[in-house]
Image: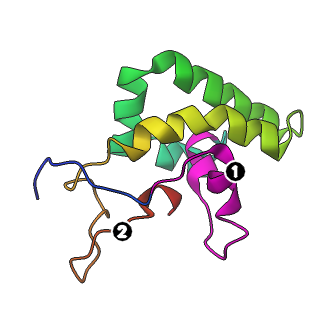
Amino acid sequence: MSNEFVKLNERKNWEEVMQMDANGVTSNFYLYFSPSWIGDIYRKMPIFNRLNLAKPDLVKVCLHSGKDYSQKLKTRVDHYQTIFPAYEFMEKNVLLSDKDVVNEEGNVDRDYLFR
């Protein structure tokens, strides 16, 4: 696999990211910022590491938002508005060599950040 960037399905705003659930696609993007053990797994992914290196202040804000959302101190809408800038960065920085970007059939998963 190469270190070339992957073109993912673009989401233009926080509503489109949040809407993934309503479209029958389970959106796991919020898990990158969840204070749960599942969030710990997502944060070990290379794309999250790239985000953390490039934008550590944004990561702190998003993690704080995830904690507030999990404690019902923040609405779903507020949380997705907060984490959308992270999505914008991550969408443009997924590499073909990242684990599970390419499926067993050799096709690129264009909704990789939501799995």
Q: Residue at x 45, y 64 (%)?
A: 111
Color style of the picture:
rainbow
Q: Nearer the viewer, residue 68 or 24?
A: 24
- Few, some or many C-alpha atoms within 10 Å of disc 2 (few <14, some 14-19, many ≥20)? some
Q: Residue at x 59, y 58 (%)?
A: 28
Relative placement, left or right, of 4 versus 44 is: left
Element assignment for label 2: loop
Q: Is residue 73 above or below residue 47?
A: above
Image coordinates of residue 47 in percent, x first then y, are 36, 42
Task: Name the disc covering residue 109, or none.
Answer: 2
Seen as rendered, the residue at the extreme front is 12
Quadrant where the N terminus is found in the figure: bottom left
**Total numbered labels:** 2
2 or 1: tag closer to the N-terminus:
1
Q: Nearer the viewer, residue 41 or 102?
A: 102
Element assignment for label 1: helix
| Of labels 2 and 1, the one closer to you | 1
Task: Name the disc covering residue 38, or none.
Answer: none
Quarter residue 20 falls in: bottom right
Image coordinates of residue 23 in percent, x first then y, are 67, 73
- Alpha carbon of mark 2 to alpha carbon of mark 1: how far? 21 Å
**Could you tell me if residue 107 is visible in this image?**
yes
Amino acid identity at mark 1: Glu
Task: Name the disc covering residue 15, or none.
Answer: 1
Q: Residue at x 31, y 56 (%)?
A: 7
Amino acid identity at mark 2: Asp
Q: Is residue 19 magenta?
A: yes
Magenta residues, start to end? 10-33
